[in-house]
Amino acid sequence: MSAYQSYFDNFFATLPMSRVNFKQLGADTLTTLRAAKLGTEFAAHEAALQSALDGFDENLTDADESTSGDTAAFKAARKQWLTFVDDTMKDYVTPKLRKLPVYADFKQYQKGKLGQLGHARLLQDSKQLLGLYQQHAAAMKYADLPTDAQALYDQLSQTHEERGTNEASIGKARVALAADWLALAQVLRRVKAQLELRFAEPAEVYRFFDFGATRVAKRNTKPAVNAV
């Protein structure tokens, strides 16, 4: 059974509450079960519930972290690079190369055009621009141009890689969030099914699940499946 089908079939998996409150719901259910002393047929369920609770980290918040730090660093490097490109165009390329055929090549990589590109394409096109700087630095009488440009490009490339690494880590954290939530939800569903075999009245079943003791999360009211 796929994870998404499990979520669909199990309302415990999609409860709109915080991780802290969901774990508390499971702990309260376990306490009530043990106090009720319902017999040996519930022993395995109690053990499974305890195991799921032990494996549930209510403090796992990595999936709620943003890449804002890395994004801010990339935006700063991007802005610095585009400013350098624009200044170089105005101060060196246009005055020195405007009447030469190569000027058309430089115009392909002006700030306005590069600024509209996505991250990967920006890096790709900017690398082509680095080649033009290398070839024509002498004609522009800017000997340090290749070195200066390369330093800014390397900074842009590095922040892009760091941003991608952080996003990958957060993606893994989201999977972890979904996995332990689903494990606890599956045990609660089985406990509920066993209780329904024991008790004819729904009220007798639901007294083991103290939903009133939990609060809907203020930060995130979406089902847990959205953490994937």
Image (tube, rainbow, N blue to C red):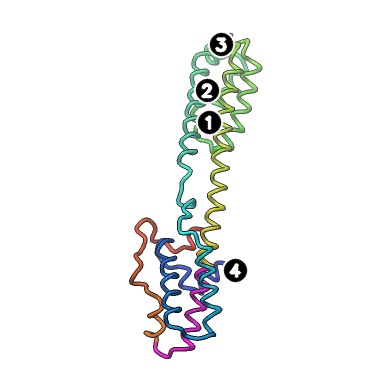
Residue 183, position in %: x, y?
54, 68
The amino acid type, in three-letter code, at marker 2 is Val
Mark 4 vs mark 3, foreground winner is 4
Dot 4 crowding, Cα within 10 Å, few <14, some 14–19, many 20+? few
The span shown in magenta is 184-201
Mark 1 vs mark 4, foreground winner is 4
Helix, strand, or loop for circle 2? helix
Label of residue 96 in the image: 3
Q: Closest to the observer: 26 or 228? A: 26
Mark 1 vs mark 3, foreground winner is 1
Look at the image and say whether residue 227 sits in the magenta stretch: no
Mark 4 vs mark 2, foreground winner is 4
Residue at (53%, 49%) from the top-left corner? 170
Q: Earlier in the sequence, mark 4 or mark 2?
A: 4
Q: Earlier in the sequence, mark 1 or mark 3?
A: 3
Residue at (41%, 72%) from the top-left corner? 28
Q: Closest to the observer: 59 or 64? A: 59
Residue corresponding to mark 4: 2
Is residue 222 found left or right of 135 in the rendered image?
left
Residue corresponding to mark 2: 85
The amino acid type, in three-letter code, at marker 1 is Leu
Q: Main secondary structure of the magenta part?
A: helix
Residue corresponding to mark 1: 114
Residue 160, position in %: x, y?
56, 36
The amino acid type, in three-letter code, at marker 3 is Lys
Q: Earlier in the sequence, mark 3 or mark 2?
A: 2
Whether 187 is drawn above or below 221: the answer is below
How far apart in space, not on screen, are marks 1 and 3 (Cα)?
Answer: 21 Å
